[in-house]
Image (spheres, rainbow, N blue to C red):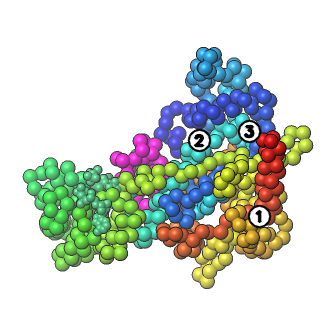
């Protein structure tokens, strides 16, 4: 998908330090060592209790296209160190020029509801390759996941109302706008004003008109009549250019002419003032004039908090136009996803060596292992799954039979699940030996997945204020492995430090 936007190789879309480390691995003869990296985040965005995974389609596009072009190599050749000498030698550049990805990639399908510390993507392969992918994978997953989550929050408050994404004009550049439009649709918006996103991603496009249309006429009524005459099948009139309620009366007049010609007044749009009061008054005027089916669209710096408040005030708004605060994730501009080394194969013994990054903060200590996530659920009376808990386990050390899941922040909190318990493993194979083995569902299917996943989440987890923490634990073998690694590392580092 991103490759549709850029007519250039994106293989250098990485941080320099990934390339210098790759050089280091190559030079020291460890480039082919088999490694496992997990991509995960530590904290839900927006103070929420859930996150919606998004961006895998871009990751797949990136990985499938990965190949350093002659121009890429020529550029790398120009890079110099602080002595003015080339950073990389020719042998390495030749290695990169011929590099084909051979990694295995597992990932959560887009639209999956995910939780802190769960791998959204797992990459296994030669460490040099895994390392180069750190930055692009984070770039592609972090932002899209953030926006899909924001949109899912909007969907929660908007309930069955229509949400239009209007963000392109204030998005973070071209790519920010394009990927935000896609992620916003996946998260729960119904359509976008972004025409290129409509074309490239098959998202429905919708829109009204701007104040300039009204201002370009001698008077508002003339502007409305002309618009209705030109586009009788797409008439949503912006009524607040001069006086909102007077604007509604003008819209009704233009609407009557439309009806006389066999068309309808689809909507009016409010873009300023007290949206609760104005929508209630506008609704009365429209209903009294027989325009019960005419929708009231509202826009103006909306977000989930304002929409929630407007609903509580009894606002009569059916369509929410949300731009800036959605596509820029205004209140939290980044998801803090990270990509950490979790295991390295010892070439002599053939065994995995588990890796961990220690931190003063327990939450920042990474979890080792070739991780998979098992989601336990039950079926409610109407057959809807009800998610109970997620268990992170090491695929190569999974316990047989009854499993014990341990809360990573409090080892005394444990849950047991019988092997017969309903469950689903969330990471699916995406690449095998560098070849794609997974077909991304179409965007509408991904969007529908978000809503079915959200239905399976307990309402407390979806609450905005002090949400309930969904249980995510480590399977006992993985918990023990992690604890022992921490203890032995502390001991080792302590000895070195003395
Ligand atoms: N009844 C309401 N309750 C809560 N928030 C509201 C209500 N009505 C409008 N808002 C929000 O309050 C903010 C008001 O924006 P602003 O200060 O720009 O006022 P305005 O009347 O829209 O002026 P402007 O013409 O400059 O856009 C917007 O984010 C809007 O969505
Ligand atoms: O407020 P957002 O959520 O970003 O939604 C998009 C905004 O873009 C348009 O305004 P415009 O760019 O004409 O400027 P305005 O902010 O002065 O209305 C539209 O009228 C909305 O107000
Ligand atoms: O179509 C609209 O009403 C629209 C589009 C972009 C931004 N604001 C409004």
Give the camera-side residue of 446 and 143.
Answer: 143
Residue farthest to the front, as pictured? 498
Q: Earlier in the sequence, mark 1 or mark 3?
A: 3
Residue 251 image offset from top left, x and y in percent: 17, 65
Residue farthest to the bottom, as pictured? 381
Quarter of the image where one finds residue 350: top right
Left or right placement of residue 282 versus residue 418 in this view: left
Left or right placement of residue 269 versus residue 200 in this view: left
SS class of the residue under badge 2?
helix
Q: Earlier in the sequence, mark 3 or mark 2?
A: 3
User: Which residue, given by chain and number where applicable, does mark 3 sit on?
Assistant: 127
- Residues in magenta, as a range: 167-194
Q: CA distance from mark 3 to mark 2?
A: 15 Å
Residue 319 image offset from top left, x and y in percent: 34, 66
Quadrant where the C terminus is found in the figure? top right
User: Which residue, given by chain and number where applicable, does mark 2 sit on?
Assistant: 136
Residue 266 image offset from top left, x and y in percent: 27, 66
Mark 3 CB lies closer than 8 A to ligand 2: no
User: Which residue, given by chain and number where applicable, does mark 1 sit on?
Assistant: 475
Mark 2 CB lies closer than 8 A to ligand 2: no
């Amino acid at each position: 998908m991103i490759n549709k936007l850029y007519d250039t190789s994106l293989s250098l879309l990485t941080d320099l330090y990934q390339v210098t480390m790759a050089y280091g691995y190559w030079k020291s003869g460890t480039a082919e060592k088999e490694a496992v990296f997990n991509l995960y985040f530590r904290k839900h965005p927006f103070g929420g209790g859930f996150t919606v995974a998004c961006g895998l389609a871009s990751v797949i596009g990136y990985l499938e296209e990965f190949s350093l072009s002659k121009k890429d190599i020529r550029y790398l050749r120009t890079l110099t160190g602080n002595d003015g000498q080339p950073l990389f030698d020719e042998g390495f550049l030749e290695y990169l020029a011929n590099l084909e990805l051979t990694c295995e990639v597992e990932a959560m399908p887009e639209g999956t509801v995910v939780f802190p510390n769960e791998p959204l993507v797992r990459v296994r392969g030669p460490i040099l390759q895994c390392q180069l992918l750190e930055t692009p994978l984070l770039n592609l997953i972090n932002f899209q996941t953030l926006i899909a989550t924001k949109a899912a929050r909007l969907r929660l408050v908007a309930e069955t109302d229509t949400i239009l994404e209007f963000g392109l004009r204030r998005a973070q550049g071209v790519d920010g706008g394009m990927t935000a439009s896609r992620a916003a649709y996946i998260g729960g918006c119904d359509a976008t004003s972004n025409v290129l996103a409509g074309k490239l991603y098959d998202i429905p496009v919708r829109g009204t008109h701007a104040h300039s249309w009204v201002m370009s006429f001698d008077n508002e009524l003339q502007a409305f009549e002309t618009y209705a005459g030109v586009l009788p099948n797409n008439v949503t009139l912006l009524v607040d250019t001069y006086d909102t309620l007077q604007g509604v009366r003008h819209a009704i007049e233009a609407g009557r002419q439309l009806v006389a010609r066999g068309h309808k007044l689809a909507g009016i749009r409010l873009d300023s003032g007290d949206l609760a009061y104005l929508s209630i008054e506008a609704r009365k005027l429209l209903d009294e004039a027989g325009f019960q089916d005419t929708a009231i669209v509202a826009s103006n710096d909306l977000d989930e908090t304002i929409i929630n408040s407007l609903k509580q005030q009894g606002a009569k708004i059916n369509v929410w136009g949300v731009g800036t605060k959605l596509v820029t994730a205004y209140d939290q501009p980044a998801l803090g996803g990270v990509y950490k080394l979790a295991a390295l194969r010892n070439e002599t013994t053939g065994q995995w060596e588990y890796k961990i990054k220690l931190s003063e903060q327990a939450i920042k200590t990474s979890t080792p292992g070739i991780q998979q996530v098992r989601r336990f659920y039950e079926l409610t009376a109407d057959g809807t799954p009800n998610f109970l808990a997620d268990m992170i386990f090491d695929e190569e050390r999974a316990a047989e039979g009854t499993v014990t899941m341990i809360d990573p922040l409090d080892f005394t909190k444990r849950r047991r699940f019988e092997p017969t318990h309903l469950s689903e493993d969330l990471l699916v194979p995406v690449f095998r030996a560098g070849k794609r083995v997974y077909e991304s569902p179409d965007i509408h299917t991904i969007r529908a997945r978000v809503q079915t996943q959200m239905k399976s989440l307990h309402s407390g987890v979806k609450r905005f204020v002090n949400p309930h923490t969904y249980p995510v634990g480590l399977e006992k073998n993985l918990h023990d492995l992690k604890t022992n690694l921490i203890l032995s590392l502390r001991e080792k580092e302590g000895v070195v430090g003395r």
